[in-house]
Image: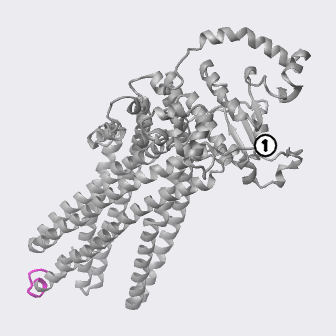
Amino acid sequence: MTWFDLNHNLDLATKITSNMDLIKDAIGEQLVTAVYFFMEFFSAITISMLIGWELTLVVTSVYTIWMVSLTIVIGKQEIRLTEREAESYSVAGSIAEEVFNSIRTVVAFGGEDKECKRYQESLRLAEESGSGKSTCLQLLQRLYDPTEGEVIIDGVDIKKINTAFLRSQIGIVGQEPVLFSGTIAENIRFGNPKATQDEITNSAKTANIHSFIEKLPHGYETLLGENGAQLSGGQKQRIAIARAIVRNPRILLLDEATSSLDNESERIVQKALDKASEGRTTLIVSHRLSSIQNANYIIVFNQGEIVETGSHEELIQQKGDYYKLRMAGKDSVNSDSCASSVDDTDQPESERKTHKSDVVDEYFSNDDPDKEQPKLEETNNHMIKIFKMSLMDWKLLAIGCICSLIVGASFPVNGLLFGYYFEVFQTEELDVMRSIALSNLLRCIALAFSAGIAALALTYSFGKAGVHLTTKLRVMYLEKALQQEIRWYDDPNNSVGGLLARLSKDCANVQGATGIRISAILQAITSIVIGGAIGLLIFWKYALIILVMVPLLFSVAAFDSQYSKSGAVKEKRAMENVSRIAVEAISNIRTVASLGLQKHVLERFDQELEIAEREALKSTRLRGLAYSLNLTMSFVVFTVPLFYAGPLISSGEIDFTKVVM
């Protein structure tokens, strides 16, 4: 448990989505691409060595040293910058997760704008620790081991007791009840996975929550939403009590179980706690003296030290700190009662706050529960809007587009220069050969530098514009999310894990779909237009054969893109569920550990991962088919024109130099 205290875990969803995508790419497509290019290079070197080893050694010695050194230098820098980017965004992601987890508090205090600014600034705050009362209960559960001394139960050091068995004998109800997404029955059964429905019902009756559950159309199968967001504080607390009771614990720990409730809710919950405490050793931590005055033994803490012990009557007679607290509490009882509104604790929390935004309306009204809610991603997936947003960096985009045209034009021009090289072999005069070779060399060097500088400029321009766009989209996403009605967050599709996954991945995908992709499209169009024009000018018959083959390449590329999109959407949904389970478990790790739910969480996590894996495999098969068709079509496009070129060369209509051009 100390590890979770020392390592900030609110950026977990960001790491699951962003970091896992990096690993997936590294051991997936990038690894395959690396092997492909290595084998291509190795095959080319082998064939070249067999044909002419002298020239091959000259070429490979320079090329190999250059490429290896360049790869090492750039690779190290890219790894370093990627780590810094991931670290920086994980901080921002943790702030977003904190906001989504506390969305009702943020909305209640009108802190939406403040949280958006904090997300941009990536601030972190720390809280001062308390006096150690709750820590004592955590020591009893062996969430921590003491550095000094012993924790003894019935004369036995708990270090000698099996941890799982120890926790199975303890039930705990905390100040902030932790419920998990799922049904009411599932949440109660988390206390005892082997509990029958009758045992669940009896524990709910003991916790004074059964009558409320029975009023719901779906009863115990009612979905609670993330962290029981559809229920009031008192209702959640009583379900937590039922969960603690159903495991029939020998020891019951109550950690400020009523401190966050109003007077009416406290009265009902306290009644449930009194019933739950019968026949059990019960340890109560509380600031409200009314909840502990019937205890057999009271321990008073002050600044982390025990200052008084005894029963209620004994401590009153001592007239020490407990007596002072008791007298001060009496003065505030009446004012507290007047200030606290008496509400119906069997009414859902969101219904009391706003009837407009309550997801539980589906249980208490005739509204259609399947009514479609506005989806945030629909407002961000219109490419026109994205391009308009990108215009804030229009200068960078203009530079990138111009440089993309230059890079695209360099490919057909390079083919033209490559064809001119064959003129060298059509003469036997050494001076003429050197003159032609030198002129072509200078042209190639000029083209290489021009294309290299243009490639550097377009990468920087589109990259910087893309980063600005991604940052703006993430801030806008958070702003739009904070403007939604509370019921929007109660939708299972809008869980904290899912929202964070979209915030991390979707916005980054938009960057990939705009900057670099626009550059690739411009380069392709420029290459086709200029290459086609050059081919038509040189020999239009042969050029037409090549141009006819181009639509075949586009059709295969469209096939690949279509199935990649359909598979990515399904995989994305599955990964959002994976993130939701992980975030929910890590955010409530103490409850998970106390209830012994580690195995259950891992099983749910594996199930969702299997779904994501199946969707990914479906997409992979189709993409593999598309890739094979693409590769096959590339060879077809290359060989069919050459087959047609043979008769043209033999008839004298065209020479080999023009074919290469």
Percent position of residue 660, x then y: 22, 76
Can residue 188 be seen by looking at this rendering? no
Q: Provide the residue span drawn in magenta.
A: 648-654
Residue at the right extreme?
A: 318
Answer with the quarter of the image where residue 626 lies: bottom left
Q: Is residue 301 magenta?
A: no
Rendered view: 280 above or below 626: above
Rendered view: 281 above or below 64: above
Percent position of residue 355, x then y: 40, 23
Which residue lies under the disc numbered 1?
Answer: 139
**Quick one: SS at disc 1?**
helix
527, 17: nearer the viewer: 17
79, 189: nearer the viewer: 189
Can residue 362 be seen by looking at this rendering? yes
Q: Is residue 212 left or right of residue 645?
A: right
Q: Residues within 10 Å of mark 1 (few under 14, many from 20)?
A: some
Q: Is residue 182 left or right of residue 177?
A: left
Answer with the quarter of the image where residue 451 lies: bottom left
Q: Is residue 67 left or right of residue 640?
A: right
Picture residue at 39% right of the left edge, 82% below the top? 44
The type of residue carrying mark 1 is Leu
Q: Count every numbered label the image shows and give the total.
A: 1
Percent position of residue 640, x then y: 18, 79
Percent position of residue 173, x then y: 67, 36
